[in-house]
Structure formats: structure tokens, C-alpha cells
Image (tube, grey):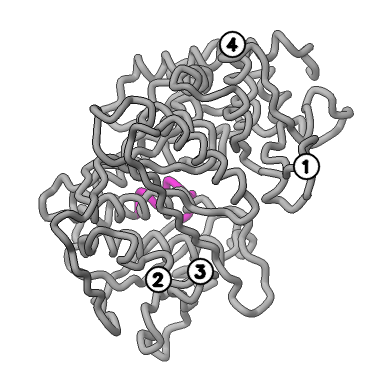
Amino acid sequence: MTGLGDLVWWHEHAADRPPAAADAVVVGPDSFQERESSVTGTDRLPGLAPAWADDLFRVARTAFVADKRIRRDTAADNWTRRIRLSVPVSDPDLWASPGPISHLTALLQTLTGDLWEVRFRAFRPEYTYETLPFADEPRASEVSLLSGGLDSLSWAATRASTGKAHGRRLLFVMFREISLDDLQLRVYASVRRLGHNREMCLVRLRQTSKGDGTGDRLETSARTRGLLYATGAVRIAAAHRVDRVNVPENGQLALNSPLTAARAAACSTRSVHPWTLHHLNALVQELSPDRDAVRAVNPLADMTKGEVCRAALDAGLEPAELVDTLSCGKPPIRQGRGLTSGQGLSMANCGACYPCLVRRSGLLHAMGADRTEYEVAPWSLPDGSERDEDWLALQRRLRTPPTLHDLLTDTPLPPAVDLGAAMGVLTRGWGELRELLELVPATGP
């Protein structure tokens, strides 16, 4: 790493190379395992996406590959990296103007905690896509991310069960994970069961970073993954002329309050934090000619995990369908531990990380019991185990009520956020967690 930081150069095709003198990590469509047409092909869209939306997705893809290629252990403090990006866009002057560049760098720094510098150059593709739009081409009226998680399933089920009169076509965007493929398809099947009166479709994308060919391992943290997913959905929504993308996450986790004084946030990701969405939406507004093209919105921002679970049941989902979802921050099947449940299915949730503890409390609150098969129960682990760290920290943290400090310690809140409503979500969520603690004998100091 130089004093200026690593330079990551996105090349759209073989002829698009950095200057010979530049010491750059060259990335591009060939940095992913998937065929490019399966990700950005216009056959999945009713027409061309606006240039700004294509650019936004390209910038997010560049940041994601950089996030994976540049390991944190190369940084001076073994964590905070200095990363420079060079990305081709349709209007470099617009992207480099004060508004867009300030929101973009704030967005990337909020997500990863790194120092980012982004430069832009003219986008010159080898060829252009052509589409033949038809007057009766079906367009979506709503676009939502659907991950395979409990929160996105709850929102999708709520929208699918509202009936035909409340909208035209529901479009769900799902980023595939091979290890979770079966689970994700079962989640969508549950939505389809409830939405027999609604027209809906699923767009499945996949973006898996390749190695650099040297045999060096990729960075294990990938905090830009959520931005990749959100901008992919924004691009699809813009092509459908839909002005909103739903990014469902219960407000309890989205606010990301700390568990300990030494740990600024309970979760490593800030993908749906209000500050993240604020900068993403401000960036889109700066780039779009009509100044209000697409907004990324968290429709569950005012709900706890238990309230999200209750809404899922009210929409008509069966308890078993809620259980068959992913909430884990470190899924065993993604970590390669290869454990299986009683039904012979790969376990999706470890049971000990903070998102799993919130999941346990939410299902307990909504259903009176949580039938999920977890890898471990943190309260049953032997003394000295590292995997009960979040469980012990949670017990200590819940001894005192939440304060405004818990809302603002990690990341600022944008002016539009109602502090009273945010405190209400946090307070009710901690109440659900206390119900879990009352059910399980407290352990630790």
C-alpha cells in the first residue's frame, strides 16, 4: 500500500486499461464468477435503465470488489484502509461535483469505516445495448429486496396478501447465494402462496467476487455487500419507472445500537441504517435529471423484530415458514461448517450472534416459542467459550434502559428521523430481549 492508498481501476472491457505508470488493481465484469449478461443484461428489464442508474451500480460493484480484494491486514492499524477508485461513468463532471462526491464518500465511509477517494472518467463501452420496448410490456408497480431473511419475507408477505386492488405487479429482487439457494427459493414460494391474487415476479441476481489469481485469500469482511444489493434494486426500479425500492430491516437492528462501551455498534453492517439510506437517496437525487427518481426506503424502520414476526403471521404465513429463514450474521453454511438439521437441511443460523439473539427474542415474542434449529445455544456453552460473547454482553447491557446515547453512538441520524419513534423502537426491542433473558437463566458476571 502506498501513502495514497490502493488504486482500484474498473475496466469495462479489455481495451480499458490504466496508464502504464499507474500501480493499480484492475477489476471489472471479469472479477465476478457470473456471466455479465446474467447481471446487467437488458433482457431482464422492460427497457434500458437510465445512465445514472447503470453508473451507480457500476460504482457499487467497483467498491464491492475493492472491499474484497484489499485485505484489512494490509492497513497500518490492521483495519482502516485507504482505497482509491477509478470508475467510468456517463457524466464524470456531474459525479465529481461537490454534491454527488460528498454523499458517495460519506456513504462508503459509513459502511466500511475506511478512507475512500473516488475519481471518475468517461464511460466508453465496446458496444451499446438495444431494446425493442413494446406498449404492453409489463412494468412493476412495487420493487422490494427479498433476501431469504425473516424481515424481507414479512414485508413481501404483507404486500402479497393485500389483494389485487392495492397495486399492479410486485417485483422482488433477490441476490442468490449458492449455499442458501434452496432456502431462498422456499421463502419466495411462501410469498407466492399468499400472493395468488397478485401479479408478481422474481429477478434473481448473483455477484460473487473472484480471487485475483495469485492465490491470496479475499478479505472476509464485506460491508459493501448491502450497497451492491440496494443499487442493483435501484437500477431495476429505475428501468421500471418505479420511484421506490423497499429495503426491509427491522428498526431495532437498523439503528444498530451498541452492546458494550468498547463496541460502537452491535452489528458490523450499517446497510439499512437511516444515515446510510439518507446518503444513498441524496446521491440518487443529485444524479437524476428529475431530482426524485428512486428512493430506497426501509418500510420496517418503526418496528421491532417481534412486531415484524407478528406482521408476518398476520399476513398469513405459517410459523414454520418464519422459522425457515436466515437472520444470522455468520451463517454456519456460509462459514463452511456443513452442519445439518434434523430434516437433513443445512443449518442457516448459528444461534449465538447478536442478529440471532434478536431473532430468538422476536419469534418468542410473536409466537411464544422459537422452533428454529440453531447450531448452538450460547447459554449452554462451556465457560471460556468465545461464542457466548454477545450473549454475555447483552445481559450486561440490558441492566439499564436505553438512552439517546444508544441511538447516536455509532452513526449520526439524519434530520428527518423522529427521535421519539426511534427511541420507542429501541425500548420495545430491548423489552423483547429481556423476555428472552427471563426465559433462559442468566449467566456470566
| Above-or-below relation of 264 to 239 | above
Residue 34 image label: 3
Callout 1 environment at 10 Å: few (<14), some (14 to 19), or many (20+)?
Answer: few
Identify the residue at image location x=60%, y=20%: 363
Image quadrant in which the C terminus is located: top right
Q: Which residue is mark 4?
A: 400
Disc with the residue nearer the chain's start (4 vs 2): 2
Q: CA distance from mark 3 to mark 4?
A: 48 Å
| Picture coordinates of residue 381, whole percent (x, y) | 85, 29
- The residue segment tinted magenta is 105-114
Disc with the residue nearer the chain's start (4 vs 1): 1
Q: Residue 112 lies in magenta, yes or no?
A: yes
Quick check: marks 4 and 2 in contact, CB under 8 Å?
no
Occupied quadrant, residue 288: bottom left
Disc with the residue nearer the chain's start (2 vs 1): 2
Identify the residue at image location x=57%, y=20%: 362
| Above-or-below relation of 147 to 159 | below
Work out whether residue 443 or residue 370 is closer to the camera in this orientation and state it. Answer: 370
